[in-house]
Image: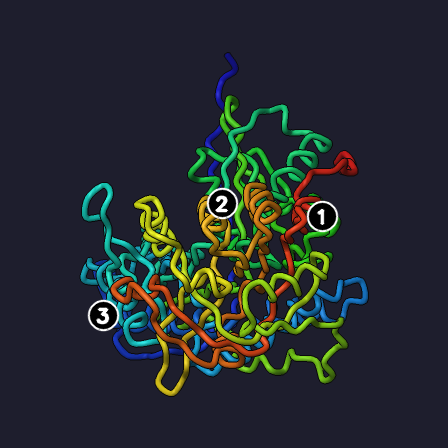
Amino acid sequence: MNSSGSFTYAPLLPVGADTTDYRLVSDEGVDVVEGPGKRRFLTVEPEVLSLLTAEAMHDIAHFLRPAHLAQLASIIDDPKASPNDRFVALDLLRNANIAAGGVLPMCQDTGTAIVMGKRGRHVLTDGRDEEAIAAGVYEAYTRLNLRYSQLAPLTMWDERNTGSNLPAQIELYAEDPGGQPDAYKFLFMAKGGGSANKSYLYQETKALLNPARMMAFLDEKLRLIGTAACPPYHLAVVIGGTSGEYALKTAKLASAKYLDNLPRHGTMAAHGFRDVELEAAVLELTRDFGIGAQFGGRYFCHDVRVIRLPRHGASCPVAIAVSCSADRQALAKITPSGVWLERLETDPARFLPDIVPDSEEVVRVDLNQPMDEIRALLSKYPVKTRLSLSGPLVVARDIAHAKIAERLDAGEPMPQYLRDHAVYYAGPAKTPEGYASGSFGPTTAGRMDSYVEKFQAAGGSMVMLAKGNRSTQVTRSCQTHGGFYLGSIGGPAARLAQDCIRHVEVLEYPELGMEAVWKIEVEDFPAFIVVDDKGNDFFADVTRPKTVLQVGARP
């Protein structure tokens, strides 16, 4: 056995210089005191952690980074973008402009609050940092028009909404951030279920580590992400890792641009690095999928980050994660100069085009008609046709579907409201005073797939509206029973609430809160035909892997 070399150390993720543009939140509650050996210590009151957290959660619910907005604007300007790409990008920019008003959050799924902190060795607190941060999450979610999504398990099978969006995921590390012993640095995120559910871990082998095999693998796996998490995505792919869980965590950080300043090449110190050549190749791969920004085109992804990590010789984890159109994260820091938070864009209107691009023909659908007439109209048009819906919709999602299925199993009839109306899979955020609705975007359709055959056979759910691709069983059921699945744009929940939803009332199960069955009145609600009554599914072709070009071997 060879003798070991001299000791060297490098952090697994050398994040590089912090070039973030910060704004001052407060200069109170922090102080510098002299300690043993004349060392200077930064003292931080617990209220400071709560204040910073609440402010961060407010900002990431309503504002986006300027770079993200610029990428949306570039889609509108790109002559290679499809009309549907441009339509989605424009709607997302309009949504950002509404959300920036600070009343309606950009997405109705205001997410799990995730906080990562790195506390320098010369930072002193009362030792209850996690509790103080949780108090800030509580303050933001209970005060603002945000949605409570966290369920407390009471038994293995029974659970109840906590009514505060707690618990948060809080991870704190004892580490001098950026080599600064008197700094406390943070990453704040709000991760909705749609994008969180599109985190994947694959346990591969050394056989994957060649250009042709890697591209074939990614061609297959990336298509499986689909559109349920609201593209265009910031996509992260991590290859390697000291463990599977570390690979997944790295992918989440990379999707938030936290690792953009990693080195570009590896060394024998075995740190992680970004492979920018492979990033470009993977981005071009996604351009050719045909999935686009939800309904066909080039913009499945805004950008790609590929991180290579060291690995055990017997393991090769591959982690994939996305940040969606609600690209919600912000950096923060507490230093002797005060409490600082990343400056997000408060004037997204400057990214809107001066002239709205021409759009394709839109089919207007009157939802006040009998269901048979609505279906007859939809049957005249092919998949990918853009629609504008006006009239009544029934809103029902996971728990309501489960309850209705139990009624059918008990021999009861399908509720008349699901026979007479199209069903929208969604769950609203809190309704602000003076508004008809809180942010009210679509939820992931695939979670309701197992109910479709049963419901359509009983005469209900003949027209469904949600986001994302669906399984072949839904396509078969629609062909058998004459049903349709319409795709709604995932992401612009604030715009839908302000511009499209005119009235909201509870129909059944009010005790379920946002999971109740609702009836809403909509006007010019945008949608696309995704699955028709003839067995056609827009996503069927674009999710099928194809032969891909090999990436050139690197020196």
Q: Earlier in the sequence, mark 3 or mark 1?
A: 3
Q: Can you identify the residue that label 1 sits on?
A: 289
**Image position of 393 with respect to 14: above or below:** below
Mark 3 element type? loop
**Image position of 462 with respect to 351: above or below:** above
Amino acid at the residue labelled 2: Glu
- 505, 549: nearer the viewer: 505
Say which residue appears at 49% left-offset and 56% top-offset: 461
- 409, 493: nearer the viewer: 409
Q: To which quarter of the image does residue 79 belong? A: bottom right
Q: Can you identify the residue that label 2 sits on?
A: 453
Mark 1 element type? loop
- CA separation in Å, label 2 and label 3: 57 Å
Could you tell me residue 533's position as x and y percent? 64, 52
Say which residue appears at 48% left-offset and 52% top-offset: 253
Q: To which quarter of the image does residue 103 belong? A: bottom left
Structural crowding at the residue carrying mark 3, measured as other residues with C-alpha within 10 Å and reported as few (<14), some (14–19) or many (≥20): some
Amino acid at the residue labelled 1: Phe
Residue furthest top in the image: 1
Q: Can you identify the residue that label 3 sits on?
A: 45
- CA separation in Å, label 3 and label 1: 51 Å
Number of numbered discs visible in the structure rendering: 3
Q: Are marks 2 and 1 in contact (CB under 8 Å)?
A: no
Could you tell me residue 457's position as x and y percent? 48, 47
Amino acid at the residue labelled 3: Glu
Q: Earlier in the sequence, mark 2 or mark 3?
A: 3
